[in-house]
């Protein structure tokens, strides 16, 4: 059934035919209003908020037929006569966004909020989810509108860029809803891809019948395992040599988890492709499945990867996808010297990245027959390498590029949508789009690795740690992408943070018939930090030593060498700048913490403090390479080309700040092109906290070389020495001459291209403190304050760094208190939507305070170190320690739900 409807959008009149079941969201995007973003399609996130007759609604659940005769306003309609609304200006001023995918919906909601208190404001925002900012910058933006002194400085004109909180340079596009994300583009002749997914956790495909689906009008192609090349690969976006098992296939004759790929349909529309998937008939041979990784390690119980083609699997008969052993000293001797030994077992869950923009790729053939993939990816160059291998194409015949990315957190370091999308284009010759649903994001992408970790520690009476023995069993799910490397960091960093002569770590990444686990912000160190930092507080309590005193007694210092797991000749993790004592001082002063302070009891409410320390490397030394091309344009401005990826972190801005500082110009004088395998130099991608430290240093070195070349040319023109010259925004000056940059550019083409890989990677350190209130009657934990001090080296852009830290802490808050992918005995995900998954919302967030402790690092650009991951790792253990301080109850399982707390009180 279809109807003609007449309506207005942003004061433009439309008459359209709409079909029953069409949402207002789909209609608006069909009409080109791309500021309305598709995220949940269940009314849970608010990213699609628009006004219908000036009332805010979630357009993803609003029937399009209901707008007959009505007026719709989207984010594109707020700015009048080229002037931003007050709310849009406030979001720019307070940087109330990172990736920006939620921002249009947040602004549309905020414009209609009329609250008297911040508490009311937080409650009013509970229908708008943000995974990046931690909500605090959004709240500050909204509160700014109530003030008369809205500041709108053109901060991009600041000359000394490094150290300045210059607004993200993509802000105008974000707050006005410009079409800048991957799905905001529809090439002519676009087809849509959908995948039939397995309903079984483990089965072999006997036969697939596709005749009914092929007969459906609008279906162009259907692919099964019989139609694709059988080449094993990993979805992990890693540099060569690949450390992961090669155990994945475009399509396989065996499925290994509920949600695994079975067949792909390419059709004229998403609806037709989805209908065709329902018409495919599959005859499955159901196989025994296994969910528990410990049981999966029993030899030949269920062998999940029995196919001979897959390789780099350490022990396939025991389902071991990865194994790590790190040790130093003599562990038995260490325990023999201990005055007492403590041993605990901890369980941490699988959690979802919940980036608001889903995985999406669009592929097509350009006029020269080259394969082009526009994708929301953190690793375009790794994707290009994989596609060349899969389809036997030269790399220069494949272009992979990103536009703006709506969040990633490691999940878009996986190559999940580009492969089948590209295959479909190669087979049909048509542009193809594949966009994951929110259900697919929760059930068929990747999660953080769930782990069971045992830690045994030997201690002297004076608090000296003499032995640590950790064993981690990690559930890597059906495939081994990131299996070994994540487990490695589970032991390496959390144990390596403390001076202990005798340490041993054994980690197993184990296949099960569940959704794969993969890269996730913190990358294994998150899990290990919860374990080590929790047990340290338990030790402090037993010894009657203040937990901070115990940490400072044992923590590594600036003179130590990080030696766990190294041979001595391959060491590349180093302690560069070191400011841990200063970080502790900032946190304790902010919280008003005094050693020996007692918990506060108020009836059934208990208050306490908790602390945790974390350590994370800034990138991957000797492996992670970053290329940069920097040139002087004929108009006297600069062009920076970098393969690096801004996933909402603001790196496109900070990299320009570094170049601007070296060249003595404003950031506005530097144009940037990033993340395109055809037009930019190679960069390993956005992961491992590497962008500022490694890509930033590449920019720094390139800018220095270009500056020297400019001065050399100017010296030749002016017949003088380079030492006499000063490079300014538009000219090169000496005591008696002034040469314009335009003149220099016309004299000689000036361009520098280089590739940089760090020999050493400095460690970033963070100290976090929290104050909590626990209701002993209900088990509810209320986090009152979160304070984090980060030994950052140098903050290139303090506001961007603070926003990263707050967002990371809130992600850690969810990990601590509410987030958990729940899987039943048949491998089904029980909570595959925002409403049941329980992400933190604005009303759940306490006061967040961040201190950027700056002590310049000797290896990073202008002394900077990485910040992207470290900010997440300390929150969960700090909260667990605060709960124990307040109540005496020690939880060793995450999340610490009210039910688990309440049960612990009764045990």
Image (cartoon, rainbow, N blue to C red):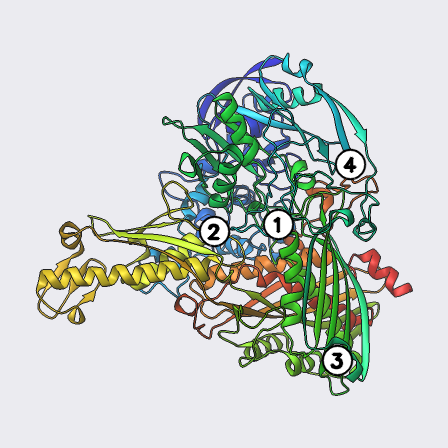
Task: Decide: few, some or many residues near mark 2? Use Cα within 10 Å; few <14, some 14-19, many ≥20.
Answer: many
- Identify whether 504 is placed above or below 303: below
Looking at the rendered structure, the secondary structure element under dot 1 is loop
Q: Which residue lies furthest to the front in this view?
A: 308
Distance of label 2 from label 1 (alpha carbons): 16 Å
What's the residue at 52%, 76% (across, down)? 578
Distance of label 4 from label 1 (alpha carbons): 22 Å
Say whether residue 37 is visible: no
**641 or 122, which is in the foreground?**
641
Residue receiving disc 1: 244
Residue receiving disc 2: 684
> Earlier along the polypeptide chain: callout 4 or callout 1?
4
Looking at the rendered structure, the secondary structure element under dot 2 is loop
Residue receiving disc 4: 202
* Residue 321 circle label: none
Distance of label 2 from label 4 (alpha carbons): 34 Å
């Amino acid at each position: 059934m279809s109807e003609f409807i007449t309506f207005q959008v942003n004061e433009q009149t439309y008459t359209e035919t709409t079909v029953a079941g069409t949402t207002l969201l789909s209609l608006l995007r069909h009409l080109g209003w791309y500021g309305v973003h598709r995220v949940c399609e269940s009314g849970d996130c608010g990213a699609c908020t628009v006004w219908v007759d000036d009332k805010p609604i979630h357009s993803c659940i609003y029937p399009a037929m209901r707008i007959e005769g009505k007026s719709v306003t989207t984010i594109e309609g707020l700015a009048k006569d080229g002037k931003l609304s007050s709310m849009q200006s406030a979001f720019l001023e307070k940087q109330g966004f990172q990736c920006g995918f939620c921002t249009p919906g947040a602004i549309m909601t905020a414009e209609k909020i009329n609250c008297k208190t911040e508490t009311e404001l937080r409650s009013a925002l509970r229908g708008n989810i943000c995974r990046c900012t931690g909500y605090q910058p959004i709240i500050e933006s909204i509160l700014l509108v109530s003030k008369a002194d809205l500041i709108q400085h053109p901060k991009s004109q600041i000359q000394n860029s490094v150290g300045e909180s210059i607004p993200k340079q993509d802000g105008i596009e974000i707050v006005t809803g410009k079409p800048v994300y991957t799905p905001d583009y529809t090439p002519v002749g676009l087809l849509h891809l959908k995948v039939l997914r397995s309903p079984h956790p483990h089965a072999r495909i006997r036969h697939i019948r596709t005749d009914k689906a092929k007969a459906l009008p609008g279906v162009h192609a259907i692919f099964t395992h019989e139609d694709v090349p059988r080449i094993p690969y990993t979805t992990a976006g890693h540099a060569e040599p690949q450390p992961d098992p090669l155990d994945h296939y475009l399509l396989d004759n065996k499925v290994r988890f509920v949600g695994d790929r079975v067949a792909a349909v390419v059709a004229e529309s998403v609806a037709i492709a989805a209908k065709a998937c329902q018409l495919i008939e599959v005859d499955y041979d159901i196989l025994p499945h296994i969910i528990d990784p410990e049981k999966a390690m029993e030899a030949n119980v269920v062998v999940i990867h029995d196919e001979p083609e897959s390789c780099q699997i350490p022990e396939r008969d025991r389902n071991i996808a990865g194994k790590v052993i790190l040790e130093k000293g003599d562990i038995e001797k260490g325990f023999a010297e201990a005055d007492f030994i403590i041993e605990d077992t901890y369980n941490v869950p699988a959690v979802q990245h919940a980036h608001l923009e889903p995985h999406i790729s669009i592929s097509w053939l350009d006029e020269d027959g080259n394969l082009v993939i526009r994708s929301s990816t953190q690793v375009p160059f790794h994707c290009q390498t994989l596609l060349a291998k899969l389809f036997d194409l030269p790399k220069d015949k494949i272009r992979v590029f990103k536009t703006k990315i709506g969040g990633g957190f490691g999940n878009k370091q996986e190559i999940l949508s580009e492969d089948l999308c590209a295959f479909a284009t190669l087979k049909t010759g048509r542009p193809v789009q594949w966009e994951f649903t929110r259900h697919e994001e929760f059930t068929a992408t990747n999660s953080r690795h769930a782990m069971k970790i045992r830690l045994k520690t030997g201690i002297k009476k004076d608090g000296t740690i003499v032995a640590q023995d950790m064993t981690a069993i990690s559930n890597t799910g059906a495939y081994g992408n990131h299996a070994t490397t994540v487990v490695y960091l589970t032991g390496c960093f959390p144990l390596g943070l403390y001076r202990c002569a005798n340490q041993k770590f054994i980690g197993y990444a184990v296949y099960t018939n569940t959704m794969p686990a993969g890269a996730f912000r913190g990358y294994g160190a998150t899990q290990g930090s919860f374990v080590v930092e929790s047990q340290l507080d338990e030790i402090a309590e037993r010894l009657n030593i203040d937990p901070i005193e115990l940490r400072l007694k044992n923590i590594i210092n600036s003179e130590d060498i990080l030696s766990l797991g190294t041979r001595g000749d391959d060491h590349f993790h180093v302690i560069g700048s070191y400011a841990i004592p200063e970080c502790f001082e900032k946190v304790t002063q902010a919280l008003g913490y005094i050693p020996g302070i007692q918990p506060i009891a108020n009836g059934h409410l208990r208050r306490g403090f908790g602390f945790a320390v974390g350590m994370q490397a800034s990138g991957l030394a000797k492996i992670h390479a970053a290329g940069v091309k920097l040139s002087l344009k004929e108009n006297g401005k600069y062009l920076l080309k970098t393969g690096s990826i801004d996933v909402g972190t603001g790196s496109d801005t900070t990299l320009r700040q570094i170049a601007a500082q070296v060249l003595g110009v404003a950031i506005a004088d530097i144009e940037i092109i990033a993340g395109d395998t055809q037009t930019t130099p190679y960069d390993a991608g956005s992961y491992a906290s590497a962008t500022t430290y490694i890509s930033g240093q590449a920019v720094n070195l390139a800018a220095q070389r270009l500056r020297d070349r400019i001065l050399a040319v100017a010296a030749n023109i002016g017949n003088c020495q380079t030492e006499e010259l000063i490079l300014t925004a538009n000219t090169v000056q000496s005591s008696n001459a002034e040469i314009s940059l335009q003149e220099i550019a016309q004299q000689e083409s000036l361009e520098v291209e280089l590739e940089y890989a760090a020999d050493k990677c400095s460690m970033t350190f963070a100290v976090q403190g929290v104050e909590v209130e626990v209701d002993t009657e209900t088990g509810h934990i209320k986090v009152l304050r979160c304070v984090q001090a980060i030994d950052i080296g140098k903050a290139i852009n303090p506001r961007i760094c603070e926003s990263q830290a707050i967002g990371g802490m809130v992600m850690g808050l969810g990990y601590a208190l509410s987030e958990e992918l729940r899987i039943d005995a048949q491998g089904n995900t029980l909570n595959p939507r925002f409403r049941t998954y329980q992400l933190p919302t604005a009303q759940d967030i306490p006061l967040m305070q961040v201190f950027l402790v700056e002590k310049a690092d000797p290896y990073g650009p202008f002394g900077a170190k990485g910040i992207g991951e470290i900010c997440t790792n300390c929150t969960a253990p700090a909260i667990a320690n605060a709960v124990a301080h307040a109540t005496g109850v020690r939880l060793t399982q995450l999340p610490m739900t009210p039910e688990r707390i309440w049960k612990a009180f009764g045990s």
